[in-house]
Amino acid sequence: MNKTIFSFLITFLAGISTIIGVIPCYLNEKYKEKVISFCLAFSSGVMLSISLISLIPEAFVLFESIFNITPLILICLIFIVLGILFSSLIDSKVEECFTKNKLYKLGIISVIVLMLHNIPEGITTFISTNQNTSLGLSLSLAIALHNIPEGISIAVPIYFSTHNRKKAFLYTLISGFSEFFGAILAYLFIARYVNNFILGIILSMTAGIMLHISIYELLPNSLEYKKNKTTIIGFILGIIVMILCERLF
């Protein structure tokens, strides 16, 4: 198989694994509050972990090739804060449309945020696979595994706010497909022009966005259901799953 086609295929499969996150939408309705509480907390743990153990360290490495340690930290922090501010802006704009439906608002925000996260992920997977097949396969497997809880963070709020499984599936699919879109961008434009500084900015801002969503949206919304034990278990499990993914791959 042509290496470029294989790279596209691997990136597509890694991204599309997001739709596995729709599975909780088929659980018994009588467990609705526990499912929502657990999944939101789990997603919060996942996003927090991705930011702290993956995105920020990767951004540091990219900036390190350009700057000394002091400006490196400062620049990284500036773009993390910009990411938080950008997320707050998205939050306020989406809230204008969905003030009566917090869960739906949360699902929409998650779609936007995870698309921003998945596009650079798709770029990385495509380029890595194209240059080193073994590395690309390992990376795509790791991405596929952590895309599943990302899918949950979209599908669960969308489904339980609309009771529409097709809509939950569609939004989750759009988020997953954005990874393949990243591969297309890499093939057509980015691979030739993106440098460490631009990638560092993208990762830092995405980390800031995810920190905001995790701490100010997902976790508080999970706690609103007053299933504190479920929230704690979900949050801790989300962190553990992502740490294991990072360690294994």
Image (cartoon, grey):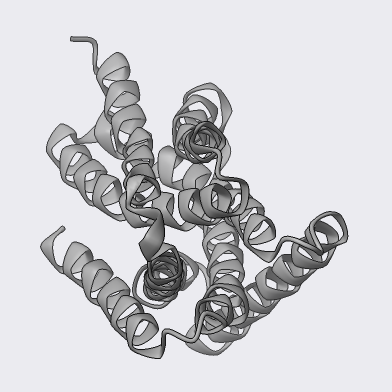
Residue found 27% across the figure and 68% down from its top: 242
Q: In this view, does 90 lie to the left or right of 188?
A: right
Image quarter for residue 10? top left
Image quarter for residue 130? top left
| Relative to 210, residue 94 above or below | above
Where residue 101 appears, as percent x and y from the top left, is 72, 60
Residue 131 in sight in this render: yes
Q: In this view, does 48 lie to the left or right of 129?
A: right
| Relative to 72, residue 165 above or below | above
Residue 195 in sight in this render: no
Of 32 and 116, the residue lying toward us:
32
Where residue 158 appears, as percent x and y from the top left, is 57, 49
Residue found 17% across the figure and 69% down from its top: 244
Quadrant (top left/top right/bottom left/bottom right) for the N terminus: top left
Of 184 and 17, the residue lying toward us:
17
Where residue 102 appears, as percent x and y from the top left, is 69, 65
Residue found 29% across the figure and 82% down from its top: 233
Q: Is residue 242 left or right of residue 168?
A: left
| Relative to 229, residue 31 above or below | above
Of 42 and 137, the residue lying toward us:
42
